[in-house]
Image: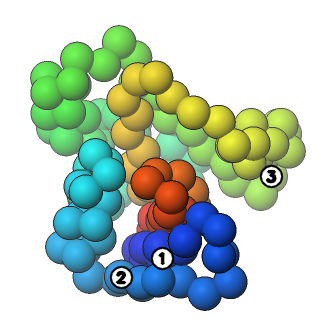
Amino acid sequence: MSELKIFAENSPGAPLAVHVDPAEIARELAAIDVRFEQWEASQPLAADAGQEAVLAAYRDDVERLNEEYGFQSVDVISLRPDHPQKDEFRAKFLNEHTHDDFEVRFFVDGQGMFYLHANGKVYAMLCT
């Protein structure tokens, strides 16, 4: 279950709010210009499915967002425990960074944690 916790930037000890309802999460994130959607990860995929198989399985949603935002590229990242470069990939995603462009993340399996800094608050978004 996805979860959003909102903290004051200068007081990270206790959250100001916690949301698990997708509509509430979407509303809170929309206030900082972040779009939140949940897709049903219902397409059957092999454990070792590559980029083409994953993109084909979710083509309709990927194309919908591509048409809306005009993305120049689409890729699939898989971080399984046995991945030979897992530490390198993990380090890339652990380092805090910013984006000048729009970015989409969709989890077919597993989860990801994102920390967004906006308006004096930290939005800790667990996506599952």
10 Å neighbourhood of mark 1: few (<14), some, or many (≥20)? Answer: some
Residue 11: where, in percent of width, then height? 65, 76
Distance from disc 3 to disc 1, alpha carbons, whole Å, reads 31 Å
**Mark identifier at residue 5:** 1
Under tag 1, what secondary structure?
Answer: strand
Q: Label 3 belongs to which residue?
A: 82
Who is closer to the viewer here, 6 or 41? 6
Residue 87 lies in what quarter of the image? top right
Task: Please tell me whether residue 7 is drawn above or below residue 36 in the rendered image.
Answer: below
Instruction: Say which residue appears at 19% left-offset and 41% top-offset.
Output: 61
Residues under numbered marks 3 and 1 in contact, where contact means CB atoms less than 8 Å apart: no
- In three-dimensional space, the C-alpha distance between marks 2 and 3, rounded to whole angstroms, equals 33 Å
Q: Are marks 1 and 2 in contact (CB under 8 Å)?
A: yes
Q: Quadrant of residue 113?
A: bottom right
Name the one closer to the observer, 111 or 5.
5
Q: What numbered label is drawn on residue 19? A: 2
Residue 78 pos. (x, y %): 60, 44
Q: How many marks?
A: 3
The amino acid type found where label 3 is placed reads: Asp
Residue type, label 2: His
Residue ID at (39%, 49%): 106
Q: Is mark 2 on a helix, strand or loop?
A: strand
